[in-house]
Image: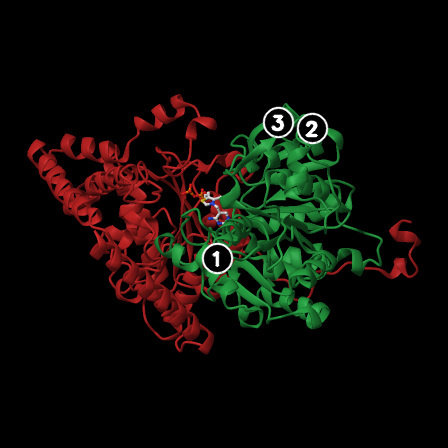
Chain colours: A green, B red
Amino acid sequence: MTTAATKAGSRTAKAKPATMAQALGRALRDSMAEDPTVHVLGEDVGTLGGVFRITDGLAKEFGDDRCTDTPLAEAGILGAAVGMAMYGLRPVVEMQFDAFAYPAFEQLMSHVAKMRNRTGGAMPLPITVRVPYGGGIGGVEHHSDSSEAYYMATPGLHVVTPATVDDAYGLLRASIASDDPVVFLEPKRLYWSKADWSPEAPAAVEPIGRAVVRRTGRSATLITYGPSLPVCMEAAEAAVAEGWDLEVVDLRSLVPFDDETVAASVRRTGRAVVVHESPGFGGPGGEIAARITERCFHHLEAPVLRVAGFDIPYPPPMLERHHLPGVDRVLDAVARLQWEADS
Amino acid sequence: MTVQELPGAAAYRPTPPPAWKPITDPAPLLPDPEPYRVLGTDAVADMDPELLLRLHAELVRGRRYNTQATALTKQGRLAVYPSSTGQEACEIAAALVLEERDWLFPSYRDTLAAVARGLDPVEALTLLRGDRHTGYDPREHRIAPLCTPLATQLPHAVGLAHAARLKGDDVVALAMVGDGGTSEGDFHEALNFAAVWKAPVVFLVQNNGFAISVPLAKQTAAPSLAHKAVGYGMPGRLVDGNDAAAVHQVLSEAVARARRGGGPTLIEAVTYRMDAHTNADDATRYRVDSEVETWRAHDPVQLLERELTGRGLLDDEGIEQAKEAAERMAAALRDRMNADPELTPMDLFTHVYAEQTSQLREQAAALRAELDAEQDHEHSAEAGR
Ligand SMILES: Cc1ncc(C[n+]2csc(CCOP(=O)(O)OP(=O)(O)O)c2C)c(N)n1
């Protein structure tokens, strides 16, 4: 298992600060350069380079046929990608914002997720659907949804979400290389987060489906992913002052789910809090808590707790700070983990 | 294998399908290839001078609203503003052709149409300021919420218009959408429903040349967006979207037709987005200044102003008055937007369901406790100072 510490140690001298957005763009570029069947399509991905500039320069380098500005129609974009994949291409679709992927749900649920199964394995669909998701950027309505629970609840899809610059590159490369459809969720408030990174020697491309321990600890495990990882890391640092030594697990992939890494950590610490910003009711945390309980029941010192966004439609930007789970809420949950037994 | 080789092929006699309905002549449904114009033609003389002056005053006010709102983004008072500068003629005409009982279904860019219809200028901006998604009661003004997901409000307009007719009310719905939005499936479905139901709806497409960075040529291969109408069985009309008089006329005719039970119309107003998509967008990445300049010479406010002064309907004093009224509106807007909006975090839970779930009650209590703790903290910090 790689930890943040060992990765940092293997940095080359050429590494310099790069943003997650740059790493994602580089992953697209390298995938396209390596494999001529990789095509990028979506709204404004060409000349503009996407509204988040992830596809910047791709149309120039690879031409309009490889990086295509489509008509404005999400169902059409994903439906066309299905046909392209049926004919041997590897389409990478950009959805402009989380809530604008909903018109494409029909294609995703009825076709993208089911095609391999419907055709008895004869027709896998190697499609990557990139969806910028989550809040915290002050976007107007329909620009901040956390839609991962819908995707997770749909068998046939992989659901992947990076939280670091390294993973943005590695996981996107792996997703594009995957013969299965991947919903690649990009935490948009981390697009401009920076880390030392070297485009000449980008991080190893690991297969998708492995969680990683970002911080080791003994008192309890925080289980999280995507936009909530920095929140949990900060909470873990703050918790030191309270006498808690928290472990932080970054899931990286929601489907497949790495039961092994998660269960191993919780068995060590005996306590777990799942943290995500999507609504808690019917959200990923419930599934994760159940899996932990099934595997670690006798190791648990306390019920698995969840810290999630409220069960409300994403609020207007001026109120979002009240909705998003922050460090305080994570620490409150840690405090509720029935510590009496220890003292 | 050819047809002849099929068993029994010799007996095959093609007959027309039994339920075939002869196609009605599509010609009347087709738009004239040239966008309809009124300004600069004799048709101006047939128009009510009062109406033309009202259009002018509203255009001047609308332009000022756009520049003021854009300025507010620079001061951080508005999170984002999609300006409709250059498109004011469409916005204003859309508002002015409707009767009070009619409904407007605007997109996120159509703040101006909503304001010209009588919506409080500040309430119209809450979505973009970020304090409330919809700062007004749609029923009170008969203005649907400014719609962010593209084209999704169009089927709503059809349903509402249909419902009104079922109830026996002569209400018309006017639905606005951009050129890019016409590519969405919802656009197709809305037009088809409207035509099949003969619903009293008018679809107004503001073709402003771009969907963010994507030019019309990459959006559609149709001769014009108005041409799409014929496929659904409704008339399509092309109008110069910078000619306020022409837009008003074409929309009025379509609204009257819908009200009479004549069914929907698709109108494409050819105009141009003078500013970037929003203040957050960099238009230099995808368009050239010379194009913008050509359109500047076809400015909707100037076009109407020149026509009216040329005809002696408007003088310098009249222009000055319109400007002063616009300035007063802008000053009031500025003042009111400079006050911090009152935020009530507990509202997060108030309007999710008619009756709050027990889960939401729990979450509300937790937030209440957090807010109280925050306040105690502030008080003790103040006391300690
Ligand atoms: C369903 C959906 N997809 C994508 C977007 C993101 N988006 C917002 S505005 C816009 C361009 C719209 O262009 P157009 O319809 O021509 O209207 P205009 O902005 O020019 O007024 C896009 C792609 C959205 N709001 N809704």
| Residue under label 3 | A15
Dot 1 or dot 2: first in sequence order is 2
Determine if marks 1 and 2 fall on one subunit: yes
User: Badge 1, how many Cα within 10 Å: few under 14, some, many 20+?
Assistant: few
User: What residue is rendered at 61% in x and 65% in y?
Assistant: A271
Residue type at numbered disc 1: Glu
Left/right of residue B217 with respect to residue B45 in the rendered view: right
Q: Mark number for residue B185?
A: none
Q: Is mark 3 within 8 Å of ligand 1?
A: no
Camera-nearest residue between B106 and A15: A15
Residue type at numbered disc 3: Ala
Q: Provide the secondary structure element on which disc 3 rests.
A: loop
Q: CA distance from mark 3 to mark 2?
A: 8 Å
Determine if marks 3 and 2 fall on one subunit: yes
Q: CA distance from mark 1 to mark 3?
A: 35 Å
Image-quadrant location for residue A2 = top right
Left/right of residue A83 with respect to residue A139 in the rendered view: right
Q: Provide the secondary structure element on which disc 1 rests.
A: loop
Q: Provide the secondary structure element on which disc 2 rests.
A: loop
User: Badge 3, how many Cα within 10 Å: few under 14, some, many 20+?
Assistant: some
Left/right of residue A175 with respect to residue A235 in the rendered view: right
**Relative height, residue B147 to residue A91 (above, below):** below
Chain to which the residue tagged by mark 1 belongs: A
Image-quadrant location for residue B210 = top left
User: What residue is rendered at 52% in x and 59% in y?
Assistant: A278
Q: CA distance from mark 1 to mark 2?
A: 40 Å
Chain to which the residue tagged by mark 3 belongs: A
| Residue under label 2 | A201
